[in-house]
Amino acid sequence: GTQYRSVIFTLDEEQLRVAQTLFAELEAAKVFGAPIVTEIVPLTQFWRAESYHQNYFERNPFQGYCMGVVAPKVAKFRKQFSKYLK
């Protein structure tokens, strides 16, 4: 549903430009094999999720969705972008 989606909230035009540039580079390189569906939107209002939603993947690595969907995506990201990770 709409409550479970990825989004980048930007605070200013510079953040918007950086996010859009990165998306264009990733799309051109066909890094993910499918269009990026993450939205880029200005931050207007924000409500912090309940504590049990915070760091969900980190706290629930063996939950079915995390194992089957999130973990492979994180692994692929780490492999492809390792030079940018600390």
Image (tube, helix red, strand yellow):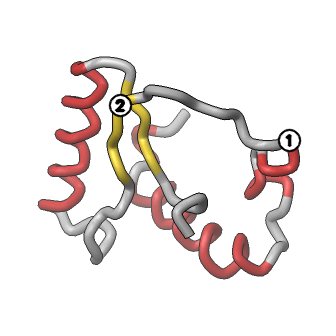
Does dot 1 land on a helix, a strand or a loop?
helix
3D distance between C-alphas at marks 1 and 2 = 24 Å
Please identify, in this view, whether the residue under mark 1 or under mark 2 is nearer the observer. Answer: 2
Instruction: Name the quadrant containing residue 38.
Output: bottom left
61 sits left or right of 76 in the view: right
Residue 11 screen position, x and y as percent? 38, 20
71 sits left or right of 16 in the view: right
Residue beneath disc 2: 42
Image point (52%, 68%), residue name:
73
Residue 35 screen position, x and y as percent? 26, 69
59 sits left or right of 76 in the view: right
The N terminus, quarter of image = bottom right
Image point (28%, 75%), residue name:
34
Residue most extreme to the front: 45
4 sits left or right of 85 in the view: right
Image point (82%, 43%), residue name:
50
| Disc 1 crowd, CA 10 A, few/some/many (<14, 14-19, 20+) | few
Instruction: Name the quadrant containing residue 72.
Output: bottom right
User: From what the image shows, is residue 65 above or below residue 45?
Assistant: below
User: From what the image shows, is residue 14 above or below residue 34?
Assistant: above
The C terminus, quarter of image = top right
- Tell me, for residue 51, which label it has, or none: 1
